[in-house]
Image (cartoon, rainbow, N blue to C red):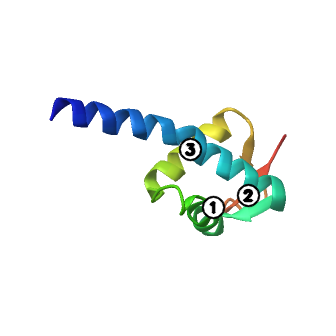
Amino acid sequence: MEEANRTAEIIHEDRKPEIEAAIVRVLKAKRKVEHNALIAEVAVALRNRFKVDVGETKRRIERLIELEYVARDDEDRKFYRYLC
C-alpha cells in the first residue's frame, strides 16, 4: 500500500510540468484566453494522456503567474495573457 501511495505521488509530480506546458501552448497560440476556456482547452489537450484535475490546473496557472510566464489581463481579470 505504501508503494502505491509513493507511485501515485510520483505520477502526480510528473504531471505538473505537462499541465504547465499545455497551459503555455494554449496561451502562446491564442495570446489571451478566458479562465474557463483555458481550463477546458488544457483538459482537451491532455485528455489522451490523463484526466486533468481542475484544481491542479488552477495551481499550475498560479505558478506560471508567479514565474511571470502568464499574467492576468489588466482590463478583465478573468482573462490570462501570455508574457514571454
Q: Position of residue 25 (x, y in %)?
A: 75, 52
Q: Position of residue 11 (x, y in %)?
A: 41, 39
Q: Residues within 10 Å of mark 3 (few under 14, many from 20)?
A: some
Kind of residue indicated by mark 1: Ala
How far is mark 1 from mark 2, CA to CA? 9 Å
In the rendered view, tell whether residue 20 sits above or below residue 13.
Answer: below
Residue at 65% x, 62% y is 38
Image position of 32 (left or right of 60) = right
Mark positioned earlier in the residue sequence (3 or 2): 2
Q: Nearer the viewer, residue 60 or 10?
A: 10
Pointer 1 local density, CA inside 10 Å: few below 14, some 14–19, many at least 20: some
- Would you name the residue on which mark 3 appears? 60
Q: Element type at marker 3?
A: helix
| Residue beneath disc 1 | 45
Disc 3 from disc 1: Cα separation: 15 Å
Q: Is residue 83 left or right of residue 24?
A: right
| Residues at marks 1 and 2 touching, judged by CB atoms closer than 8 Å | yes
Tell me which amino acid carries mark 3.
Arg
- The residue that label 2 is drawn on is 26
